């Protein structure tokens, strides 16, 4: 389910009767929503949440066949079914984990830029306890978010932990009472939508994640920062950002990713 209001798209995993357990259809719909939001200039930030009291309880075992049975066609199977991943988008993505997020429910959220969690909910990458292995690039995302030792503990034990511990481990940005999680995430997203230039956010996000993906050196990052500064300095948004600050008013940014975006160059 997709709801766009005032520059913020809220994407809701909407199977509350099944605790939003993950299905292939859910993955397809989320992937499609990501693409549509990334191409929509009216969307400045994205929030992903779950309907009801759970974010996502993990893979759906309610059908006749186990989701961990051998696939009928190995050529179509992917352990990373969300395509594009949240970190591959140009818009900031905030995961509002309003309740439990287990297995793929958490590994999907690990691909977001920020995570707001419920302080007393349960979180865990439990796949090794089900006889399979973690998915959605979590061997990489967790190592980026935390230390290698913490990532190893989470992935190799498959244990669950609270939202408060998720913050302490560096996996989440903030833990709040469950009923406050979505409102806070939307508040952060709305602040981005109102006060952050779309092109600036897109360039900064891509540089942040591309630096991790490509293992850029500090000097390579410095080179790209210089090139990207030159891309935005003197633009209408740069002039408007300064004018709005001096006038003490909200900015009116006019950049449009749909027609102005070009990929980042090589360092």
Image (cartoon, helix red, strand yellow):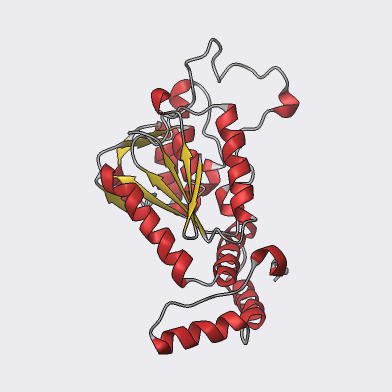
Location of residue 9 with respect to 107 vertically, above or below: below
Which of the 4 image quarters holds residue 123?
Answer: top left
Visible residue check, residue 142: yes
Count of labels in the image: 0
Q: Residue at x 53, y 72 (%)?
A: 197
Q: Is residue 4 left or right of residue 39?
A: left
Name the one closer to the observer, 33 or 119.
Answer: 33
Q: Is residue 74 left or right of residue 164?
A: right
Name the one closer to the observer, 252 or 48.
Answer: 252
Q: Residue at x 59, y 28 (%)?
A: 24
Name the one closer to the observer, 250 or 169.
Answer: 250
**Residue 58 position within the rendered picture, expressed as x and y whole percent measured from the top left:** 45, 29
Q: Is residue 170 left or right of residue 144?
A: left
- Judged from this view, the residue extending furthest toward the right is 75
Location of residue 83 with respect to 134 vertically, above or below: below
Q: Residue at x 53, y 25 (%)?
A: 132
Visible residue check, residue 168: no
**Residue 169 position within the rendered picture, expressed as x and y whole percent measured from the top left:** 34, 49
Location of residue 53 with respect to 149 vertically, above or below: above
């Amino acid at each position: 389910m997709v709801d766009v209001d005032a520059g913020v798209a809220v994407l809701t995993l909407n199977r509350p009767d099944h605790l939003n357990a993950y299905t292939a259809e859910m993955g397809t719909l989320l992937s499609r929503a990501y693409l549509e939001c990334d191409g929509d200039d009216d969307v400045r930030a994205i929030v992903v949440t779950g309907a009801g009291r759970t974010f996502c309880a993990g893979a759906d075992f309610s059908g006749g066949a186990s989701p961990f049975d051998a696939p009928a066609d190995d050529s179509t199977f992917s352990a990373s079914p969300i395509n594009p991943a949240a970190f591959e988008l140009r818009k900031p993505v905030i995961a509002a984990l309003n309740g439990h997020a287990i297995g793929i429910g958490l590994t999907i959220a690990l691909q977001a830029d920020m995570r707001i969690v419920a302080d007393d909910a349960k979180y865990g990458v439990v796949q090794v306890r089900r006889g399979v292995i973690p998915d959605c690039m979590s061997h990489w995302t967790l190592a980026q978010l935390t230390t290698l030792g913490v990532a190893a503990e989470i992935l190799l034990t498959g244990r669950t932990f609270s939202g408060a511990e998720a913050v302490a481990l560096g996996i989440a940005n903030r833990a709040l009472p469950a009923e406050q999680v979505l409102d806070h995430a939307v508040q952060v997203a709305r602040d981005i939508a109102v006060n952050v230039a779309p092109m600036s956010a897109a360039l900064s996000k891509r540089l942040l994640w591309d630096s991790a993906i490509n293992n850029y050196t500090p000097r390579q990052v410095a080179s790209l920062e210089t090139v990207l500064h030159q891309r935005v300095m003197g633009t209408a948004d740069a002039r408007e950002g300064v004018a709005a600050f001096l006038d003490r008013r909200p900015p009116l940014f006019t950049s449009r990713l749909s027609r102005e975006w070009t990929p980042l160059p090589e360092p």
